[in-house]
Image (tube, rainbow, N blue to C red):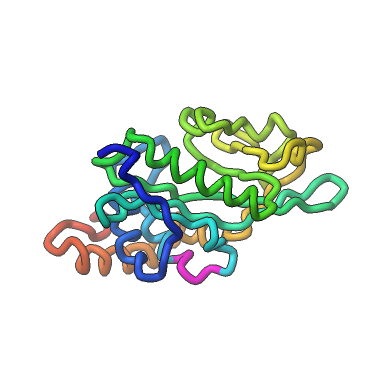
Amino acid sequence: MGVENIIIRNEMPDDYEAILRLTYEAFLTLDYPGRRRTDEHYLIHLLQNCPHVTPELCYVAEAEGKIVGHILYTRSAVVRLDKTELETVTFGPLSVLPKCQRQGIGRMLVRHSMEKAREMGFAAVLIDGVPDYYPKLGFVRARKYGLTLRDGSSDDSFMAYELKAGALHGGGTLYFLAETEFERAERDDDGFWAFHQAFMRAYYPGQAGGPPAV
């Protein structure tokens, strides 16, 4: 599949079920220290009616009429030392079907959506992502700008991309406005397993999908 055959378009309400399945499959084999489970599809579910989602920046990648990639944005804000605020955005999950990965689809989604974010007047894109991947797309460590998360940390996974030159200079603290939904996806074990079991019954009947035995 060549990227020349990919169509990038805005996410539509009817895409929800396809995006759920795409997200689950895209992250199923992802592993890193501290990862507990594949819960990104639960996050998509929790964000469905979240007021901090920016629908104008949520895009899908289509190939031959099938959704093979998706990017979702939520609003965030950088609070500077003088208490002024910058309107920023944050993306994630960014999902590409496993068979379509390493073909530039994720890069297309990121670049297309960030150009739209620039047109909309946002100052920057801030993410917590894979430290070795996003610098290839122009992201830099957020600490370069003196930025920290609310807990004061600024590790390699916290990265920034200025949409307005100089916007982030002077530093500040990033606030993820959809933080409640992201934390719930990670910490709400009962809610996750109830959702995930129903999800597996609906889309992958006969496959294991229940909570681990204790």
Quarter containing the C terminus: bottom left
Q: Is residue 213 above or below residue 191?
A: above
Nearest to the observer: residue 169 or residue 198: 169
Residue at the far right in the pictured view = 82
User: Was residue 104 drawn as part of the magenta stretch in this picture?
Assistant: no
Q: Which residue is pictured at 25% across the width and 39% down the height?
A: 1
Q: Main secondary structure of the magenta part?
A: loop
Residue 212 lies left or right of residue 96; in this view the side is left
Height in image: 144 above or below 213?
A: above
Residue 67 in which image quadrant = bottom left
Left or right placement of residue 84 versus residue 72 in this view: right
Q: Which is nearer the eye, 153 or 50?
A: 50
160 relative position to 12: left or right:
right
Tell me how many marks there are.
0
Q: Which quarter of the picture shows residue 162?
A: top right
How far across and down, in percent of the image, does residue 97 sit? 29, 46
In this picture, which residue range is highlighted in magenta?
46-50
Quarter assignment of residue 196: bottom left
| Residue at 41 percent of width and 66 percent of height | 12
Query: Residue visible at 32% across and 63% down?
Result: 193
Residue at horizontal 46%, vertical 31%? 133
Please identify the residue farthest to the front as the structure is shown: 4
Q: How far across and how far down the image is residue 170, in percent?
A: 81, 37
